[in-house]
Image: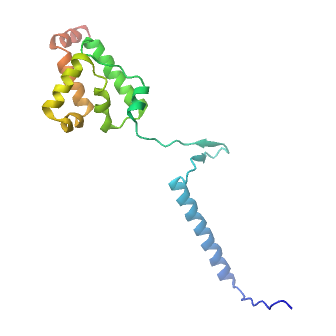
Amino acid sequence: MPPKRTTTPMTDATIKQLIAQGVADALAEYEANRSSGNGDDSHDSGSGRRRTEHTTRECTYSDFLKCQPLNFKGTEGVVGLTQWFKKIESVFYISNCTVGNQIKFATCTSLGSELTWWNSHVKTVGHDAAYGMTCKTLMKMLTDKYRPRSEIKKLEIEI
């Protein structure tokens, strides 16, 4: 003979409380999984189609070089310096280069007299100061060095 089962009657209030707790637990788990990504980077956009969301990772020097930045020798004149500025800015954007890496990566494109100038600057101010400056500061320094005042005046007159 099977054992007798003892059941405890449940009230409507108890059933509703269990359901509410189950729903709250399920929502909390859903939110936790959604926030952490849980390894699933696919999201439903509401159209019934799935889209993939890629997380941004920090740019490496290899990523930077794959974008083919221009080298700068310091002999290209105003036009070459301007083209180098524009190309470097574009490469920073495309490669997701962090501000902390921009000076390091940009100055690695230096060749010839520009490389000599940069190495002497690093020696003078130290690595931390040299690589800690902003791109704007570096661009101003290069402009002051490689755009003689007479060329700037000529450009202003032409414009």
Answer above or below: position of 127 versus 147.
Answer: below
Q: Quadrant of the N terminus?
A: bottom right
Q: Is residue 97 left or right of residue 23?
A: left
Displayed quadrant of residue 94: top left
Give percent across and percent down for residue 106: 31, 27
Give percent across and percent down for residue 84: 32, 19
Query: Looking at the image, which is closer to me, 152 or 78?
Result: 78
Q: Quadrant of the C terminus?
A: top left
Answer above or below: position of 83 versus 46.
Answer: above
Figure disc tally? 0
Give percent across and percent down for residue 91: 39, 27
Residue ID at (55%, 64%): 28
Q: Is residue 116 left or right of residue 27?
A: left
Residue ID at (58%, 64%): 27
Residue at the left extreme of this rendering: 124
Residue at the right extreme of this rendering: 1
Displayed quadrant of residue 78: top left
Displayed quadrant of residue 148: top left
Residue ID at (18%, 22%): 117
Answer above or below: position of 140 versus 39.
Answer: above
Give percent across and percent down for residue 129: 18, 37
Query: Looking at the image, which is closer to me, 5 or 113?
Result: 113
Q: Is residue 78 left or right of residue 144?
A: right
Q: Is residue 120 left or right of residue 55?
A: left
